Amino acid sequence: MNIAVKPEVETAADIAAMPLERLNPARVDRFYNDTIWPVFERLRREDPVHFTPESEYGPYWSVTKWNDIMAVDTNHEAFSSAEGIGLANLEQVAAQEEALLAMGQERRRRGGAGFITMDEPDHAPARKAVSPTLAPANMHNMAPLVRERAGQILDSLPIGQEFDWVDLVSKELTAMTLATLFDFPFEKRRKLPYWSDMVMNQPGHGPVESWQQKAGAMMECFGAFNELWNQRVNAPPGNDLISMLAHNPATRDMPPETYQGNVILLIVGGNDTTRNTISGSVRLLNQNPDQYAKLRANPELVLPMVSETIRYQTPLAHMSRVATRDIEVGGKAIKAGDRVVMWYISGNRDEEMVDRPNEFIIDRERPRQHMSFGFGVHRCVGNRVAEMQLTIIWEEILKRFPEIKVVGEPVLNWSAFVHGYESLPVVIPTRN
């Protein structure tokens, strides 16, 4: 269920005319309507470290240029993750907590979002607990299974009929891979992207109809993963993510809310980057037919195309931190306790760091030069999983289909955090 696009969609001229101090870069309708780009172009040009004094998220700083983002992201001593890594809509947080309390549940804000919201020295041991499952050697071992499943997904698609690429391909591949990484019951795999959507959406968007339904879905998710924990902690150590957490000395005694936070982190992190890049690659190749022709002529370009899509799409638009002390960034005085938002989606378009940043170019000289996985101690732990799935699905697509045609406008996420697709209508005209 999606709210229709507002008729008063902003233009670039509206954004240029707005007083700078009134500019709130995280206004969600701009992401939904795909009108965010002039906002970040203006901030990079006029006010790269920008303060928004009042918003639905409270006051916050926006950091929009590559080098300033890097300075924040790599300074984990001065910028803490412990109070959350996203911009939280204050009214929505209150409504969600009220719904959870009504169900007899209390969600703790601190310590409830897994190792991504831990600072050092606690962060590294907890992150290392899951790292072996996501290591290159394990990805190499998993690749044949992912390839087999990708082939099965693609071979099941209708030819000559319109269908939703997000549903039949992007969600399905990520659900299969996540189920394997968790050793989650394979026949229930679509629960994983469903729970991810329930966590990341608000009522009226995605599958969320009410705060109560959202709270109920979260409790269902935690119940299922508590069962998996109890199975794995009493069994010999395995190679899946839950077993790794259950048997590692750094995580086996973590409180329940931290385990729940780790589960949500791994589900959402494992779902959104891959899923939205798979969808984004189809749309971007359709919008740039010269690049699609280049890819068809040279399948060796799949890996750089994947990296260029991850840059251009930027599946997670931002991450945020809270300053632990007074510090200067980009000439601005940030006070202890201030929230600072790193707009990766803007850094990936920084004209000073990326040549022709607003163009989708699949054979760039340095395609991995992007910010989408973050930097420093919190760099995305699953980035190789994402690249593996994306590379394999496109290698298999090129073997089968001369073309995938986008036949209508996509529906984008209602989010300033997850930058991606609710749906993408396509037709595959013929097979090879």
Image: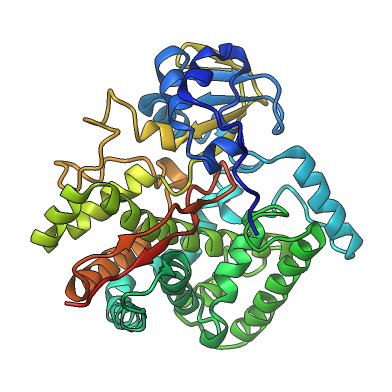
Q: Nearer the viewer, residue 398 or 261?
A: 398
Q: Point out the image quarter for the N terminus.
A: bottom right
How many discs appear? 0
Residue 152's spot in the image, x, y percent?
Answer: 33, 84
Q: Is residue 376 visible?
A: yes
Where is residue 167 shown, x and y percent of the image?
A: 48, 69
Can residue 80 be seen here? The reply is no
Q: Is residue 333 left or right of residue 42?
A: right
Q: Nearer the viewer, residue 276 or 146?
A: 276
Residue depicted at x 67% and y 26%:
337
Task: Tell me where residue 303 appears, x and y as whole percent.
Answer: 21, 57
Seen as rendered, the residue at the extreme left is 297
Viewer-nearest residue: 11 or 142: 11
* Residue 4 image offset from top left, x and y in percent: 62, 48
Question: Residue 193's image quarter?
Answer: bottom right
What residue do we see at 31% from left, 78% from top?
159
| Residue found 16% across the figure and 77% down from its top | 432
